Amino acid sequence: MGRTAAQKARAARILAVLKERYPDAHCELDWTVPHELLIATILSAQCTDASVNRATPGLFRAFPTPADYARATPEEIEPHIRSIGLFRNKAKAIHATCSLLCERFGGEVPRTMEELLLLRGVARKTANVVLGNCFGVNVGVVVDTHVERLSHRLGLSRQKTVAAIERDLMELFPREDWCLLSHLLIFHGRRACKARGGSCSEDPICLEFCSGSRAASAGAKKVARKRGTSR
């Protein structure tokens, strides 16, 4: 279903204020070359970026290239990521992924969604992270827990599934902003519009845009008081 001009104009306003608030929004996983971001994103499943960033310096030193992971065994990878949840399964995924990179892609991270989805441990979200951040290719929008929460709160989507939320965001925002959009929403979700204990009741972005939230209610009352009316 297409979006109305009013909905797209509202989305453009949200994007503009988020860009103004977070001019340095970026992927908060640490990496220097594409295969490192691919591995870090695999590790980030059900895990915080901060915990991944604590583990990856040692991991990346021990295995500088995809071929190094491929030559190792999952059991040899495990000690470097033991602090991360599901580390055994993730070690297997990393080993299988790097083996396929070497066997099929010459040790290079592929640049298409279809090829990335062949890799173990890689679903659409991980592929979007790699494509957007490593190669500037916007195929879709990364929808993690923060993006899902804020999409609902900011009235950008009413959908319940990640796939449907992503489709809504792709309809609302220009393709060239899809990668940045996810960073902006994640930054705002981590710093202000948190799942619990956030500053929504005082945050101007939440006060203006949060749909059906306590913040929106507080914002409406503030506006009403300023106008000398009551609600």
Image: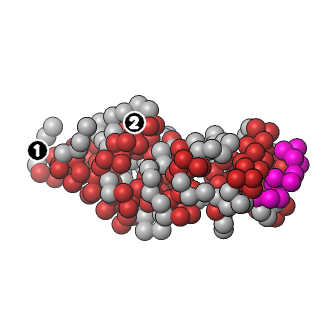
Answer with left or right where residue 51 lies relative to residue 152.
right
What segment is highlighted magenta in the picture?
A: 66-76
The residue at the point 70 percent across, 53 percent down is 104
Q: Is residue 24 above or below residue 71?
A: below
Task: Answer yes or no: is residue 33 visible.
Answer: yes
Q: Position of 184 compared to 35: left or right?
A: left
Which residue in the structure is indicated by mark 1?
A: 229
Of marks 1 and 2, which one's residue comes earlier in the chain? 2
Q: Nearer the viewer, residue 93 or 161?
A: 93
What residue occupies the far top of the structure in this picture? 160
Q: Is residue 67 above or below residue 127?
A: below
Between 198 and 91, the residue placed more toward the observer is 91
Q: x and y percent of residue 130 in the render?
A: 57, 56
Question: Looking at the image, which residue is at 15% across and 37% down?
Answer: 231
Q: Amino acid at mark 1?
A: Thr
Q: Position of residue 49 (x, y in %)?
A: 63, 52
On-image quarter of the N terminus = top left
Mark 1 neighbour class, 10 Å CA radius: few under 14, some 14 to 19, many 20 or more = few
Q: Please name whichever residue, 51 or 171, is drawn nearer the observer in this view of the structure.
A: 171
Q: Which residue is mark 2?
A: 164
Secondary structure under tag 2 reads: helix
* Magenta stretch, overall SS: helix
Say what amino acid the circle numbered 2 marks: Ala
